[in-house]
């Protein structure tokens, strides 16, 4: 019985990894994830120039999870590229997936090239952040813009490109365009645009007013998105959105995901949740009498 999977040509000892936004800019944080059982490490998104991010408060509890608006705070792509070596050493040979964000195809191209130069094993293009003004989901809702960004980046890089897409009316069409442009896999989904208002101050709680809803509340939406896209494309998919235990991870895999990312549950429970999910997956695969977890991928489409 094995949990090993291959995603975009990278070998993962387990199909569990962190979601981009929750990892600290610290190799030690990556080491803890790997020690807990993660099969890969995903860095926070980098932009061309350093970003301070939004003022506090940046995160607030909400029904079924959190609403988060950090503003893609990062030290800039050049500095992140210099930091990747430390993350790779800390990961002990597990893949390190960098994340690129920007306001234009030119931004994504420059950032992704810097991340490749730094030694990243793959680059995830963040075209789905719901609170990144001028970028994120504002770009990722348009199929042609997604096609242009992915085409330019995949045509320039030697490492695999992963398109991270969010909830959109034309998600299947957008996914098809990303794959046609050269994306080797899709990460589905990102957080969903949301807001919380303080009933006493009568104002939005977050400094940015709008943030992204993360956690259990969005899990059924993510499962549906993965199911729809896999049904039409049979693409390699990394599932994200409300994964909190082995059962929610298995749902995504049955819908078509090859691997899953954990975000809000890491905020709540730390790296222990990775270990719990991995052990649960091992037990489930064994009980189901399967030789490897790959036998589960997309099985919900065969029933």
Image: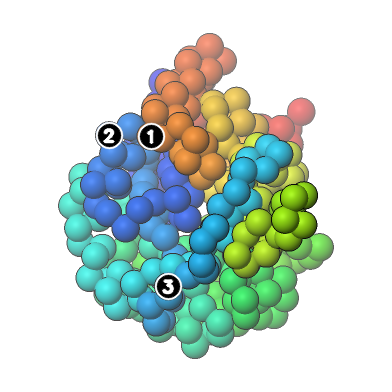
Local crowd at mark 3 within 10 Å, few (<14), some, or many (≥20)? few
Residue at 57 percent of width and 37 percent of height: 243
User: Where is residue 284 shown, x and y percent of the image?
Assistant: 53, 18
Using the image as rendered, state which of residue 248 and residue 45 is in the foreground.
45
Furthest-top residue in view?
Answer: 287
Q: Is residue 119 visible?
A: yes
Does residue 35 appear to the left or right of 214 in the view shown? left
Eyeballing the image, is 112 above or below 31?
below
Eyeballing the image, is 168 above or below 28?
below
Eyeballing the image, is 83 above or below 51?
above
Does residue 142 appear to the left or right of 29 in the view shown? right
Residues at discs 1 and 2 in contact (Cβ within 8 Å): yes
Residue hosting label 3: 52
SS of the residue under disc 3? loop
Residue hosting label 1: 271
SS of the residue under disc 2? helix
Residue hosting label 2: 35
Residues at discs 2 and 3 in contact (Cβ within 8 Å): no
């Amino acid at each position: 019985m094995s949990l090993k999977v291959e995603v975009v040509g990278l070998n993962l000892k387990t199909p569990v990894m962190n979601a981009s936004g929750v990892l600290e800019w610290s190799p030690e944080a990556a080491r803890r994830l790997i020690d807990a059982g993660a099969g890969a490490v995903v860095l926070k998104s980098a932009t061309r120039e350093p970003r301070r991010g939004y003022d506090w408060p940046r995160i607030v509890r909400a029904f079924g999870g959190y609403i988060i608006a950090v503003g893609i705070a990062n030290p800039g792509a050049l500095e992140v590229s210099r930091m990747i070596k430390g993350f790779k050493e800390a990961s002990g040979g597990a893949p390190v997936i960098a994340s690129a964000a920007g306001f234009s195809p030119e931004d994504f191209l420059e950032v992704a090239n810097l991340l490749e130069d730094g030694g990243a094993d793959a680059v995830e293009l963040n075209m789905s952040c719901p609170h990144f003004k001028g970028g994120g989901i504002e770009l990722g809702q348009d199929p042609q813009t997604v096609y242009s960004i992915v085409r330019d980046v995949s045509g320039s890089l030697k490492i695999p490109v992963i398109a991270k897409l969010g909830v959109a009316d034309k998600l299947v069409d957008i996914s098809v365009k990303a794959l046609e442009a050269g994306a080797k896999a899709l990460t589905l989904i990102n957080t969903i645009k949301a807001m919380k208002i303080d009933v006493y101050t009568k104002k939005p709680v977050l400094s940015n007013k709008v943030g992204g809803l993360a956690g259990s509340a969005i899990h059924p939406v993510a499962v549906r998105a993965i199911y729809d896209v896999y049904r039409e494309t049979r693409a390699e998919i990394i599932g994200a959105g409300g994964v909190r235990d082995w059962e929610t991870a298995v749902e995504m895999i049955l819908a078509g995901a090859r691997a899953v990312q954990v975000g809000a549950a890491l905020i709540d429970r730390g790296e222990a949740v990775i270990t719990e999910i991995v052990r649960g997956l091992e037990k489930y695969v064994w009980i189901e009498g399967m030789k490897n977890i790959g036998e589960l991928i997309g099985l919900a489409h065969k029933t």
